[in-house]
């Protein structure tokens, strides 16, 4: 065999080797894309009811290059936009406002479930009336407005009222920690409406959510098929029993992580994903 033919054979071998390496890289990308990281919002991506920082936004963009990312929060999409930006449904792969009772994939809505259809208008009215009367009789230092907020998949109930300022919100959280206002309220509702099959979940600083059993944050998992995702990670701050992150944090399909705030969220993710992928 002459020199030219030897060079030609070596070139072909080299080309096959390069193609194999490129295929391997593609396989690695596909494998990492079968992972998804889900984040709570308040206390995880942002301080409670505050806007996301530029640092966090940039971090999420970088993480999304490595794997799918999603948000699963208790608030509705409009409140989520106030914190995460108006284009948030296009900046994550999956977005699950109201625990996934409203669901977005790649910016498109893929599902909506309604609390009023499950409960019925008569039961819903009884529940709301009872809560309003209970709040009226609560003797707390501060009351503002919007004590009950109806969302498509739940009721959000706040003894102080959602119209309070940041300073008032912080004060109520400390007062509630000492006097257990929300925990006591929840126990009363459990007894009064025991036949309605409802779940009560304390989240954030000033309120708690009421929704049918099974409509907690694990509801979003029905949109994440096991054939599509090998690993599901979740980061949240209210991961204790009774907190609104508890059910998804302890779910068998999920690797749950407790965070103390946005900085801690980024720190844990960097150690988990940027060093190992």
Image (cartoon, rainbow, N blue to C red):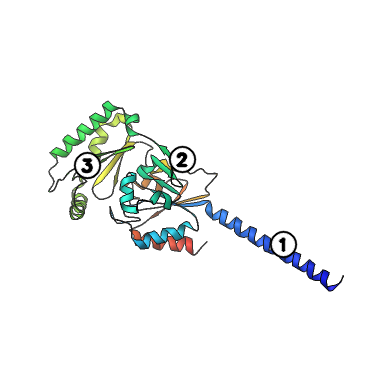
Label 1: element kind: helix
Describe residue 148's horizontal placement relative to residue 41 as left or right: left
Q: Position of residue 71 (x, y in %)?
A: 40, 50
Residue at 32% x, 31% y: name it: 116
Residue that protrudes farthest toward the right in the picture = 1
Question: To which quarter of the image does residue 128 belong?
Answer: top left
Label 3: element kind: helix
C-alpha distance separating marks 2 and 3: 32 Å
Q: Earlier in the sequence, mark 2 or mark 3?
A: 3
Tell whether label 1 touches label 2 (CB within 8 Å).
Answer: no
Instruction: Report the quarter where the N terminus lies.
Output: bottom right
The residue at which mark 1 appears reads as 16
Residue at 58% x, 57% y: name it: 28
Instruction: Check disc 2: other Cα within 10 Å, few if <14, some if 14-19, many if 20+.
Output: few
Give the answer, above or below, for where 199 lies relative to 140: above
Q: Position of residue 175 (x, y in %)?
A: 18, 51
C-alpha distance separating marks 2 and 1: 42 Å
The residue at which mark 3 appears reads as 184
Label 2: element kind: helix
C-alpha distance separating marks 3 and 1: 69 Å
Q: Position of residue 211 (x, y in %)?
A: 32, 37
Q: Position of residue 150 (x, y in %)?
A: 27, 37
Tell whether label 1 touches label 3 (CB within 8 Å).
Answer: no
Residue at 34% x, 37% y: name it: 153
Please give the label number shown on residue 222.
Answer: 2
């Amino acid at each position: 065999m002459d020199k030219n033919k030897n060079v030609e054979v070596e070139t072909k071998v080299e080309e096959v080797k390069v193609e194999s390496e490129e295929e391997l890289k593609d396989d690695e990308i596909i494998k990492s894309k079968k992972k998804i990281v889900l984040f709570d919002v308040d206390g995880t991506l942002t301080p409670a009811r505050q806007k996301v920082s530029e640092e966090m936004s940039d971090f999420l963009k970088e993480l999304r290059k490595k794997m799918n990312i999603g948000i699963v929060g208790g608030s509705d999409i409009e409140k989520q936009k106030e914190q995460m930006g108006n284009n948030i449904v296009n900046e994550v792969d999956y977005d699950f406002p109201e625990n996934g009772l409203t669901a977005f994939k790649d910016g498109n809505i893929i599902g909506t479930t309604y609390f009023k259809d499950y409960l019925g208008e008569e039961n819903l009215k009884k529940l709301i009336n009872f809560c309003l009367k209970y709040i009226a009789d609560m003797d707390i230092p501060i009351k503002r407005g919007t004590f009950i907020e109806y969302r498509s998949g739940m009721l959000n109930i706040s003894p102080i009222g959602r119209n309070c300022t940041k300073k008032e919100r912080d004060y109520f959280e400390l007062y509630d920690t000492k006097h257990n206002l929300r925990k006591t309220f929840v126990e009363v509702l459990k007894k009064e409406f025991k036949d309605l099959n409802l779940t009560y979940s304390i989240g954030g600083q000033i309120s708690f959510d009421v929704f049918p059993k099974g409509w907690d944050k694990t509801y979003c998992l029905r949109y994440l098929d096991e054939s599509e995702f090998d690993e599901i990670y979740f980061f949240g701050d209210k991961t204790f029993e009774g907190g609104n992150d508890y059910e998804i944090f302890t779910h068998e399909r999920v690797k749950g992580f407790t965070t103390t705030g946005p900085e801690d969220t980024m720190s844990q993710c960097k150690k988990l994903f940027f060093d190992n992928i």
